[in-house]
Amino acid sequence: MAYDVIIIGAGASGIFTSIFLIDENPNLKILLLDKGKALENRDRKKGCDILEGWGGAGSFSDGKLVMSIEREYGGHLQEYIHDLDLFTRLMKKVDETYMRFSDTPNIRVYGDNEEKIEQIKIRAARCGLHLLSAKIRHLGTDHNFTILKNMYAYLKDKIDIRFDQEVVGCGPLDKARQGGEGFEVEVKDLKNVREYTERSRFLVLAPGRRGMPFFKKVAENLGLELMNNQVDIGVRVELPNWVMKEICDVVYEPKLVARTPKTDLRARTFCVNYGGEVVQEQAGNLVTCNGHSYSDDTKKTANTNFALLVSTQFTHPFNDPYGYGKAIAQQCNVLGKGVIVQRLKDLRQDRRTTEKRLHEMNIQPTLKSATPGNLGYAFPYTQMKATLEMLELLDKLMPGMCGPDTLLYGPEIKWYSSRTTLKPNLESKIKDLYCLGDGVGITRGLVQASQCGMIAANDILQKLNVGQR
């Protein structure tokens, strides 16, 4: 074999797998492949660059390290790690590793004032909301970028890292597809326009959010059973900082969940960016929105933004939640030639927002490329009604949430990658084939994605008889 381990995807899972393998055994031959670009060549103004390349979708994210054992945070990793003590130790090690590569010591951790958090939880409950809280180390887009740069500097001379490499096929060498005899990976070099193959003893699939369709295709080709029937449809809300300041000062990212009164759908807030900016993402031909913020106070804006998502769990016979979310995104993109922005007052009055109305507002959008329009033409009635109901509940807790100039951007859609059956070591039914991170449906955040890499690395090291970290 040319390599001991081939890792597909240079996001958090792939990077942490590499770090913990090479920390323990510097002699391992590791190949890390990614379809995107090196960190310094990624442009956050280009939609595709936000999701692909070194660091994956996390490179330009808000850089939140959410430290919680609650199942509502970060994904489904608790379903594989039943030992909460182990889960906590791994979580602590993730935090320590990010700080190991940080140039800035003592980056603030929010959510440690239990008395104030309890008071906010009580207030939220009286408004029909459930507040989830966790300790969060806010790296910010700026510090997060620096940490990833330092991680790359540490690994670049210890393993082979190749960018602009599209994996077009992979699988075990043995015809029975039981694994254990090594893997072959077929690669298309997008930069030099050539195709080649590489072989390794172990294969790690960590394709990230952008790689969801890739993983589904690979899993189907390898006969791995897939499970998924959920999609979250929503908008990104933007409003003045003062509306959420009191709560953000205590918990930084308030995750508020509720069953909407009339539609009875589960709605939640997600990815709160105090003093942040709304950004555009592009996945293939789809344009969606997201939010970022900096740790540096001098870079903060006057606005806070967050995702407001409505969960939709489909039942038999429908089994294409990705296609459903894609259709809604396409509708928005057709109407707005990308992301649509609308004033809450206009949405309630069933009229589109115009450039004139936008210009006259007290708050100005941070995503300048968004097209003023009417989200009601693009979103299903039920999801839009649930969104408005959730905003009204939030307004009870944080007066000003439903101000006439509150801005709604769409679409913001969170797809849940198809999952396959995995062992506690995150190994698939094919021996020595590991599936990690957001792109394979296990995680939804930096901490759990990073934990995945540590779990896989530890198992590989044990199999190679180099000891357990």
Image (cartoon, rainbow, N blue to C red):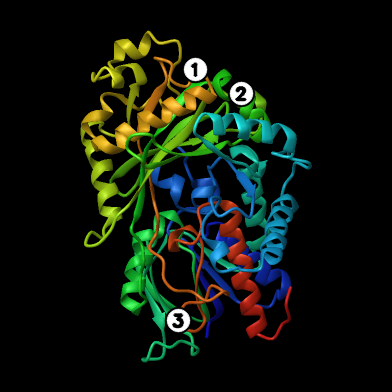
Kind of residue at disc 3? Lys
SS label for mark 2: helix
Q: Distance between the residues labelled 2 and 1?
A: 12 Å
Q: Could you tell me residue 423's position as x and y percent?
A: 52, 76
Which is more N-terminal, label 1 or label 3?
A: 1
Q: How far apart are marks 3 and 1 (CA)?
A: 52 Å
Which is more N-terminal, label 1 or label 2?
A: 2
Q: Which of 85 and 375 is in front in this view?
A: 85
Q: Which of 223 and 300 is in front in this view?
A: 223
Residue at figure coordinates x 58%, y 57% from the top left: 448
Residue at figure coordinates x 61%, y 54% from the top left: 447
Q: Could you tell me residue 309's position as x and y percent?
A: 41, 40
Q: Name the residue under label 1.
A: 400
Q: In which quarter of the image is residue 247?
A: top right
Q: Could you tell me residue 400's position as x and y percent?
A: 49, 17
Q: Name the residue under label 2.
A: 245
Which is more N-terminal, label 2 or label 3?
A: 2
SS label for mark 1: loop
Q: In which quarter of the image is residue 227?
A: bottom left
Residue at figure coordinates x 61%, y 78% from the top left: 460
Q: Count neighbours of disc 3 (C-alpha within 10 A) and say few if under 14, some if 14 to 19, many if 20 or more.
A: some
- Count the marks: 3
